[in-house]
Amino acid sequence: MAPTCYLLAATLLLTSISRALCATFTLTNSCTYTVWPGLLSSAGSPPLATTGFALAPGESRAVDAPPSWSGRIWARTLCATDASTNRFSCATGDCGSGAVAPATLAEFTLNGAGGNDFYDVSLVDGYNLPMVVAPQGGGDGGGAATCGATGCLVDLNAACPGELRVAAGGGGGGGAIACRSACEAFGTAEYCCSGEYGTPATCRPSAYSQFFKNACPRAYSYAYDDATQKSSNDPSPRPKDPQLEDDSWLASLATGEVDGASMASTSLLLQATLAVAVMALLVLH
């Protein structure tokens, strides 16, 4: 297994700059191989110009969204077109009515309650890649000091419990390429927070959700993990995550190195950065 420091070496960089007329998400793939971002608007939110595309290593692409857009962005991996059926599919994060679980999700609501921008990284539908959302600017001048990074910088696939693990090729012999949620793996009301477990009082963290939470304290780990979500104007304390609080991983994006080690193709990090311009917040608030 690749050392942890290599997780910062291969990244998909996502920046969102809110402006008077729109928000722009610029996705940059700093991985050593191609990834396929997926984008989905929430019900009632205007659709974006695209729902997905390929990003070769080092490639960038900008996608405009309305100021009040809400939706999710994720990354698909190991995608290919079947020569006999001409059907395009991906091993993780494939598209159905959104991302087919398991997939790490970045979720956004721009210009939401109180004119704030809300964001989170969710492992409720499982995990396929490390992902971080790191605000830059905004917050009435407070910027990142007010909001802070959220997400998951840890490669969870290798440590994923066997009953949740998704192996390459769909069998048990390949390496782990994703980690399912307990809800997807077992389908019970207790794990899915449904039926008699459909309230915050009755649906409590499980040993499986704690696996995700312990590794990634700031990411959603189950349906009612709502204290994890942040807004662009929320000064409340965030769950402690030493890896996110040490912002050296941001500097590594510019050099392609982490702790002196060059980018490793064996590791994949989806690094998402939400940058909200102060000028735009003055318009949206």
Image: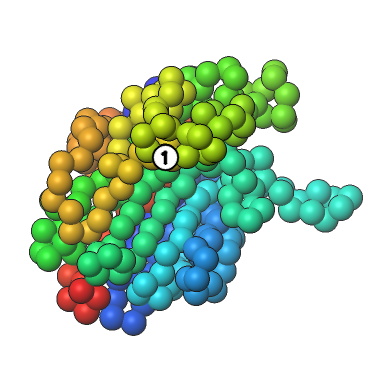
From where the camera sits, is residue 58 visible?
Answer: no
Q: Residue at x 46, y 47 (%)?
A: 105
Percent across and percent down for residue 250 are 27, 45
Residue 141, placed above or below residue 234: below
Percent across and percent down for residue 44 are 50, 71
**Dot 1: element:** loop
Give the amino acid at mark 1: Thr
**Can you say which quadrant of the picture contains the C terminus?**
bottom left
Q: Nearer the viewer, residue 125 or 15?
A: 125
Q: Residue at x 43, y 20 (%)?
A: 207
Side (left or right) of 129 relative to 275: right
Residue 205, placed above or below residue 271: above
Point out the residue furthest to the right here.
Answer: 84
Tell me the quarter of the picture where residue 200 sits.
top left
Residue 240, placed above or below residue 46: above
Side (left or right) of 161 relative to 22: right
Residue 278, placed above or below residue 224: below
The residue that mark 1 highlights is 199
Percent across and percent down for residue 202 are 41, 32
